[in-house]
Amino acid sequence: MEILPQEVESLSRAAAKSLSENLCLEEKPLLVSVLGSGWEKLPSACEIKSEIPFSEIPGFAEPRAKGHEGKIVLASAGETDILFQLGRLHCYEGYSPLTVCFPIWAYAALGVKAILLLCAAGGLNPVFLPGDLIIVSDHILLWGENPLTGLLDSPNPRFHLEGSNVYSPFMSDALRQCLPPETRVDVGVYVYTKGPSYETLAEATLLRVAGADVVGMSIAQEALTAHALGMEVAAMCCVTNLLLPPPLTPPTHDLVLEVAGKTVERLTSFPERYARMMCDRLK
Ligand code: HPA
């Protein structure tokens, strides 16, 4: 099922109601984190309080990519809770950008104030190594459809459409502070490509010249949607493979899952530390 622009507001209210009831939410969650390829073990050290599969939430499509389970988990992270989205939807699965971003609409309807988008990406900046974490400072989405297409007529004066402040400096600085000290972490520009094929050498070279440090098939549309709906946004990618210089062995989805998974194993203390910083800011 694809989401149509004229139904997104009412459907997102129904999805929020379902999340609230099925997850037994006592209060509005402050923070949601979307876990992409290889990131699904991030909540492994958190106590899981409740969960619901995408299939039981109105408007949520089924993830079709390997490693993307498709469920929402309410996890206790110290003094606050985090809502984790395990698995994400992608346009390369055949879904429209609005369908892919519908979970973000549901979180906004639920009253979530901040969102952390986590994903895997290919490295374009030759100083990066596989396993590095890159905090996204900005993105390029010129080659993908804008997820707000068709929505300008909706009664939505609250839309923030400017593109210059999508990624929150506070949330981005907090990421760096909450990662274990030995983590290799840097900052960079993310460029969206639709996929599902990985980039040719000519494409990777073009994207690098255009100013990108990492390339991936997600987050930019989710980030724009969350920003437009008034949420504070941060994003971080795990570099799972290098595209420049050209690799001897081409990337595969299994490699992406493996490299990101190994990096994420070392981040068990991160959710609780990050939740604490966000809680102090948002409460
Ligand atoms: N290209 C696009 N998306 C990706 C890559 C890549 O090389 N690696 C992980 N996600």
Image (cartoon, rainbow, N blue to C red):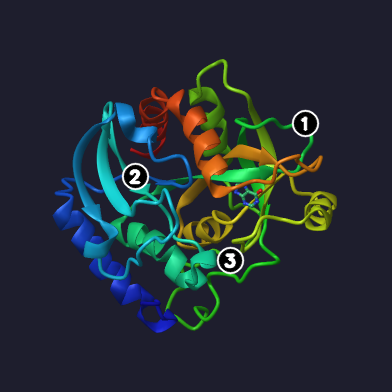
Residue type at mark 2 is Phe
Coordinates of residue 243 in the picture (x, y in percent): 74, 44
Coordinates of residue 194 in the picture (x, y in percent): 61, 64
Query: Is residue 29 in view from this perspective?
Result: yes
Coordinates of residue 70 in the picture (x, y in percent): 33, 54
Side of 66 relative to 135 (left or right): left
Name the residue carrying label 2: 84
Near-viewer residue (230 or 213): 213
Near-viewer residue (229 or 98): 98
Residue at the image point whose x is 61% and y is 38% from the top: 240
User: Which of pointers 3 and 1 lies earlier in the amino acid sequence?
Assistant: 1
**Quick check: marks 3 and 1 in contact, CB under 8 Å?**
no
Residue at the image point whose x is 83% and y is 57% from the top: 202
Residue type at mark 1 is Val
The residues bearing labels 2 and 1 have C-alpha atoms spaced at a distance of 31 Å
Residue type at mark 3 is Leu
**Quick check: marks 2 and 1 in contact, CB under 8 Å?**
no
Does mark 3 have its CB less than 8 Å from ligand 1?
no
Query: Is residue 235 in view from this perspective?
Result: no
Coordinates of residue 94 in the picture (x, y in percent): 49, 72
Residue 161 - label? 3
Mark 2, mark 1: which one is toward the viewer?
1
Q: Which residue lies furthest to the top in this view?
A: 182
Per the image, label 2 sits on a secondary structure element best described as strand
Does mark 2 have its CB less than 8 Å from ligand 1?
no
Binning the other alpha carbons within 10 Å of mark 3 as few (below 14), some (14 to 19) or many (20 upward) gives some
